[in-house]
Image (spheres, rainbow, N blue to C red):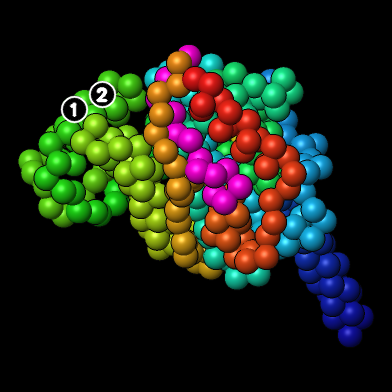
Amino acid sequence: MKGAKIMKLFNGNVNGGLIRKIGITILSICLFLICSAILYVTKLASMPQKLPPEEGEIAHITNANLEKVTEKKMDDFWTIAVFGVDSRTGEIGSGTNADAQLIMTINRANGEIRLASVYRDTLLMKNTENESFGKINSAYAEGGPYQNVMALNTNLDLKITDYISFSWKAAVDAINMMGGIDLELSKSEWYYMNSFITETVNCTGVASSHLDGPGMQHLDGVQAVAYCRLRLMDSDFNRTERQRKVMELVLEKARSLSWEELINILTVVLPQTATSVQFDDLAMMAKGISQYHIVETGGFPFVQEEARLGRYGACLIPNTLESNVIQLHRLLYQDEDYQCSDKVKEIGKEILKQAVRN
């Protein structure tokens, strides 16, 4: 009887010690996994290129020209500037033209996305500090995202809170990792495609192949980027329409991917971008990608005139800036009551003066 009690006590001590050891082991594994996850997230968050503060820091940008009621309506949307830079070397700061400029609004309540391309040759106030005018794509070349966001906010009565800049290579890699996209090529588009494919291969170092003819095609990343660059057979209006079409197809494809696949894409693409978007927000979008959908797109200015203006070269003149900005707010924010700021009216008058003077 006494021996049985001793054995019972012994077994209790052994089991208690074993349980404590197992508990400590499990806790250690959990801590290791948590630390590994934190390190991984920190690594991802640090991947985008760091631009000089005077080029990439937009967090403190405000737009004092906006009416309070307009600003309040905009707060229901996340407004992001998307810059596709004409970079052959992978550099995405100042010194490169942002030939693709898109303003994207995301409705916070329902995930609806609206896109507006800003035509690169549009004559606007490109530098708000010295109030100089020029083609809007040169704003990025002079001062990177900061100057470009300032210009877009001031000229178009916007409140852009974030930006993302990317090169051709980033787009190529993202589309390749998604498995490509399907779209139909016209005969004229196909006629010019192969030369653009060759140039994109040379610039990015990513292999691809020429296309045999028009019609429905499955495009890899290089071919899709080449398609986005086409404009020789028509115009920049058509080129930006192609860019928006590819963005729609990419988003549609992304919605079918798993969380792990999306994170893998971010791991490859982020080092080729510069952005003010926090990684937590990127991860949130990736995780909830199924709720986001593009519902409307357009090109700014909606009504314009082409003109060759001396030192500016071939430009697009908004006709008028005020009416085009009103239409832009209807597209991006569904704001039917929006009224332009005095600053937009002032810039519009100066644009017309510049056009006449030159």
Above or below, comparing residue 129 to residue 178 in the picture: above
- Residue at figure coordinates x 78%, y 65% from the top left: 19
Residue extending furthest toward the top: 311
Q: Residue furthest bottom?
A: 1
**Residue 81 figure quarter:** top right
The residue segment tinted magenta is 311-324
Which residue shows up at 56% across the image and 33% down it?
A: 352
User: Which mark is on residue 195?
Assistant: 1
Q: Please, what secondary structure does the residue beneath circle 1 have?
A: helix
Res. 16 visible in picture? yes
Mark 2 = which residue?
199
Relative placement, left or right, of 211 versus 128 is left
Q: Position of residue 121 (x, y in %)?
A: 45, 30
Viewer-proximal residue, 176 or 316?
Answer: 316
Q: Evaluate whether residue 226 shows in this view.
A: no
On screen, residue 184 above or below 95: below
- Marks 2 & 1, CB-CB < 8 Å contact: yes
Residue type pointed to by label 2: Glu
Looking at the image, residue 356 sits to the left or right of residue 86; the answer is right
Q: Nearer the viewer, residue 60 or 271?
A: 60
What is the x, y in percent for residue 174?
41, 42
Q: Residues within 10 Å of mark 2 (few under 14, many from 20)?
A: some
Q: Nearer the viewer, residue 143 or 22?
A: 143
